[in-house]
Image (spheres, coloured by chain):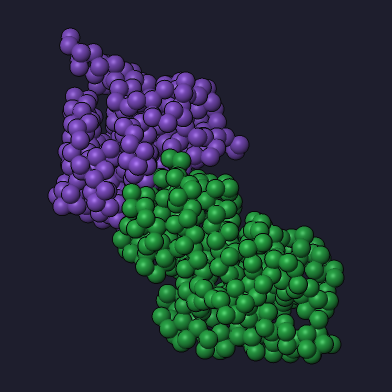
Amino acid sequence: MNDEDHTIEKLTQIARELRILALKAITEAKSGHPGGSLSAADIVTTLFFHQMSHDPQNPHCPDRDRFVLSKGHGCPILYAALAKAGYFPESELLTTLRKVNSRIQGHPDHVRFPFMETSSGSLGQGLSIAQGMALAAQIDKKKYKIYCLLGDGEIQEGQIWETAMSAPKYHLDNLIAIIDANKGQIDGYTKDVMNLSPLKQKWEAFNWEVQEINGHNFSEILNAFNNTQKEQKKPHLIIANTIKGKGVSFMENNIEWHGTAPTPEQRDKAIQELTSEKYS
Amino acid sequence: MTEYVNINPKVQKASRASFGEALVSIGEKYPEVVVLDADLSVSTKSAGFSKKFPERFFQMGIAESNMIGTAAGLALSGKTPFLCSFGCFVVGRFETIRISIAYNQVNARIIGTHAGLGIGEDGYTQMALEDIALMRSLPGMGVLQPADAIETAKMIEYLAGHHKGPVYVRLTRQNLVTLFNQDYEFQYGKGVMLKEGKHIAILATGGTVYNSYLACEKLDKDGLSTSLINIHTLKPIDEDLILKLARSHKRIVTVEDHNIIGGLGSAVSEVLAEEGASIPLLRLGVQDIYGESGTAEDLYEKYGLSPQKIYESICTDHLQLT
């Protein structure tokens, strides 16, 4: 095994654990968004357990890389990553998500839970916020990067395209946006609700450095992030083609799992699949 | 009159102009101050800062939501952003302010210029008449409106270096008469007594303070002794002062270049009603209707905010009540 194989093996295992943790938390909460949490799991895993410079022992270190979850409803997978990384106890995630007095809200809350770099959930705002962080790094001549995860449905918001215009103006090559292109949104498939294609050409036309990858292939994810580390005087966009509900057969590509919690029986069936040999 | 008051109609300046000058001076003193504008820097007067500190000025184009979110990101990274546009355009992106700035509780200073009827000829579409109401409804959002150049400068200095949390500042296109001298000290959340009387307490804000002062002079001549209070902080409102005035006066009048719903009149009525203060309240302002084109003076006359109209409304109200 070479180094990349080792990394991929490690990330595959962590992503599996994060998926299970997120599904357990959503089941306990009796509400939440499994579809978009599972589609983002491999990207989030790669960021927190390989790509990003961050330290749970020094969580507010000024030089840390930032992760902005613009698609705020995907927060169960982010909470799972933070718990797994040691920012807060897994038991807290499994018992308090979405419950009254909890710091882990149904959508990210920066004030209650400052490990969230920003509050989000009202779609379309996170990329602007990430841009502001990138500008601050530029002013302060800091090297940290800002990773911003968007939903593909989310980019129907007009504010996204305002930032699509402004980030290239400021040559923000420290800004790395990732679209979790899982092709689904609440009312159906994105192609039917509001067609986004040609997605790559749109962002290229706005002068972003665009890559398109399979968002469940760690080799491609690692390579794509690696390509973003060079100074190119352009902001980066990774279109990660993903599967909504990835890893659980009965959730995959099924819009009904956008915002529905599994029953305990469905959770157990999902965990069984995720821990089986077939999961990859 | 109190020692910090020095009303001088010969010296006039728009609060946006005072803001632009203040911004340049705080830029020197506070390196964390950054400024964003949405293609109105010549009008909002943030252009002076852009020339002096180009590396800390961000021209965001005609895209206010992106400006708001970007400012939030800068604030989350330790900067103190002043983000500027016409009041109606920036507050119109309410949902972005609500989440990116207010819910995050960041140190952003939202500057809304050309407030109210005072914008004049451009007409209703450019006229912020609901901005105070919207910004007051956001938890933790301070809402400020200075009444002259000196108050503006001191307010901006305070916001650059001393205030925690998000704030909306409402500024005028039109010139404002100087009300204060350099002894004036800005105190967040405190009403400012301009003159003390006995019968009627007039609380005014921004561009209506001087007109209210002229109305007071006429009322005093008629034997109706008036107090005049400048309310530069609409939220948090100075509850103690309002209740004190309610105890010592027979009428309260509010004057604002804003819809009477949700603005100063509403804020004062909430304080009075909750305390059970049995004092009549007259709310002068835009009476829940849209504005229109015209000179600022003509509009103030038509919508009841000229000195003469303020005077007449208070006289009519007084006659009805006595």
Q: Quadrant for the C terminus of chain A, please.
A: top left
Instruction: Please name whichever residue, B220 or A263, is drawn nearer the observer in this view of the structure.
Output: B220
Residue B147 percent location from the top left of the image: 60, 70
Residue at point 75%, 86% (across, down): B219
The residue that appears at 67% across and 83% down in the rendered structure is B214
Q: Position of residue A252 (x, y in %)?
A: 28, 35
**Is the residue A89 above or below the residue B118 in the image?**
above
Look at the image and tell me in which quarter the N terminus of chain A lies.
top left
Q: Is residue A65 left or right of residue B135?
A: left
Chain with colour purple in the figure: A
Which residue is pictured at 43% across the width and 83% down the height?
A: B121
In the picture, residue A157 is in which quadrant? bottom left
Which of the 4 quarters of the picture holds residue A251? Answer: top left
Residue B198 x %, y %: 83, 76
The answer to whether residue B213 of the structure is visible from this angle is: yes
- The residue at 60%/38% (across/down) is A100
Q: Residue extending furthest top? A: A1
Apparent side of residue A210 relative to residue B190 in the rendered image (left or right): left
Closest to the observer, A263 or B176:
B176
Q: Is residue A101 above or below residue B176?
A: above
Q: Which chain is green?
A: B
Q: Is residue B125 left or right of residue B164?
A: left
Quarter occupied by residue A7: top left
Report if residue A23 is visible in the image.
Answer: no
Is the residue B43 above or below the residue B136 in the image? Answer: below
The mark tally for this picture is 0
Q: Position of residue A154 (x, y in %)?
A: 32, 49
